Image (tube, helix red, strand yellow):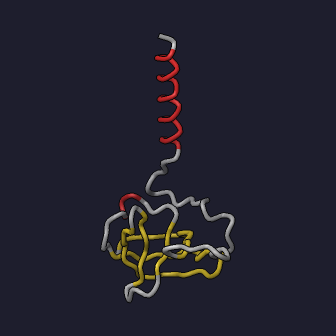
Amino acid sequence: MKVYPLFLLMILTLSALMSSCQKPASVLNQSCYKDRKVQETVNGKIAIISLWNDIYLLTSVDGTERWQPCDLPSDLKIEKLKVVFSGDVMSIFPGERRVATPLHLISISKQ
């Protein structure tokens, strides 16, 4: 019978940790690329939202560039949605393989 309270405590702790990771859609406070250097800043770039496995990407209209924002607002997680964004394009580490270039969003909106 002592296992049941411990199990309940573990469930409550895990749910509290998981809910603390979620951010409101309006907040673009991204810290997941803080250890990377800014390669360039882009302003007013037009892109299309695409989904690769479970990762949302921004793909240029001509399909030649892909960016991976670390915290895309949930209301914009719609495949084939055209958006306008500004942000810092972050560096890729030597030997690192990525599906898209890391992007720290400054602003993003539907076009």
Report which quarter residue 64 is drawn in. Answer: bottom left
Vertical side of 3 occupied by 71: above or below = below
Residue at 49 percent across and 70 percent down: it is: 68
**In this view of the protein, which residue sits in the foreground, 75 or 34?**
34
Percent coordinates x, y for residue 1 in the rendering: 47, 10
Residue 7 in the image: x percent, y percent?
Answer: 48, 23
Q: Name the residue rendered at 40%, 70% in the picture.
A: 109
Total marks in image:
0
Residue 20 to residue 42: above or below: above
Judging depth in this view, the residue of 38 and 100 nearest the camera is 100
**Residue furthest top in the image:** 1
Q: In which quarter of the image is the C terminus?
A: bottom left
**Pick the front one: 72 or 64:** 64
Q: Position of residue 10 (x, y in %)?
A: 52, 28
> Residue 82 appears at what percent x and percent y?
34, 76
Above or below residue 80? Residue 11 is above
Taking the image as shown, residue 1 lies to the left or right of residue 34, namely: left
Q: Residue at point 45% right, 57% down?
A: 26
Question: Which image quadrant is residue 55 in?
Answer: bottom left
Q: Residue at x 36, y 72 (%)?
A: 50
